[in-house]
């Protein structure tokens, strides 16, 4: 379910109390670990953590590069971690670390899904969010785009 909220505050106000509490808690972890240079904004109907267009305007769709995002969906909450899912090795390491916490790992193509805050290892989320600077994220994204254009696929 995609929100039409224009601000993060509006988005949070739309949520049922239990969802708002979980989203706000994850949001605080993200903000505490987010490297300098990313911005929090509403984009794609969710809370997005992105590279501002002023910093990197040369995107394929004219939208800021999404580093991470947080969304309340119909049956769960989704945490999108582009930096993890853009690299097969990083994804595998994240999955292994997640499973090692004893929490149930439920993932989509580029997101982790959870129903309750207790289902999400917040320390691991913080580590994942803090792991990549804006410059590194832009460089890796550009390398992936170049590889796709040349037919070499995505990152390691």
Image (cartoon, rainbow, N blue to C red):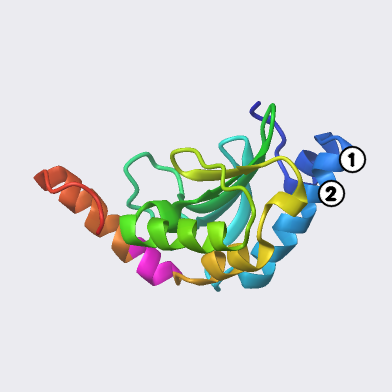
Q: How far, Cα to Cα, is label 1 from label 2?
A: 6 Å
- Residue drawn at point x = 64 percent, y = 54 percent: 103
Direction from residue 98 to residue 20 in the image, left or right = right
The boundaries of the magenta stretch are: 134-138
Element under label 2? helix
- Residue drawn at point x = 34 percent, y = 48 percent: 59
Q: Could you say which quadrant of the image residue 92 lies in?
A: bottom left
| Along the line of sight, the residue nearer the viewer: 11 or 94 | 94
Percent x, y of residue 23? 75, 48
Q: Residues within 10 Å of mark 1 (few under 14, many from 20)?
A: few
Check if residue 135 falls in the magenta segment: yes
Label 1 sits on residue? 17
| Along the line of sight, the residue nearer the viewer: 103 or 146 | 103
Check if residue 74 falls in the magenta segment: no
- Residue drawn at point x = 56 percent, y = 36 percent: 44
Percent x, y of residue 122? 68, 62
| Whether label 1 touches label 2, CB < 8 Å | yes
Direction from residue 54 to residue 75 in the image, left or right = right
Element under label 1? helix
Label 2 sits on residue? 21
Q: Residues within 10 Å of mark 2 (few under 14, many from 20)?
A: some
Q: Main secondary structure of the magenta part?
A: helix
Percent x, y of residue 56? 39, 59
- Seen in the picture, residue 17 relative to 74 is either above or below; the reply is below
Res 54 visible:
no
């Amino acid at each position: 379910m995609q929100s039409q909220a224009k601000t993060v505050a509006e988005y949070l106000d739309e949520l049922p109390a239990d969802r708002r509490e979980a989203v706000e808690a994850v949001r605080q972890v993200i903000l505490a670990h987010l490297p300098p240079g990313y911005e929090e904004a509403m984009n794609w109907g969710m809370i997005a953590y992105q590279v501002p267009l002023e910093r990197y305007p040369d995107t394929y769709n004219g939208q800021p590069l999404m580093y991470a995002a947080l969304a309340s969906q119909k049956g769960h909450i989704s945490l999108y971690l582009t930096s993890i899912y853009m690299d097969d090795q990083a994804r595998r390491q994240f999955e292994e670390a997640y499973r090692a916490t004893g929490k149930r790992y439920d993932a989509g193509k580029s997101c982790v899904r959870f129903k309750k805050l207790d289902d999400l290892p917040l320390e691991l989320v913080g580590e994942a969010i803090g792991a990549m600077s804006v410059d590194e994220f832009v460089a890796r994204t550009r390398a992936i785009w170049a590889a796709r254009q040349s037919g070499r696929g995505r990152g390691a």
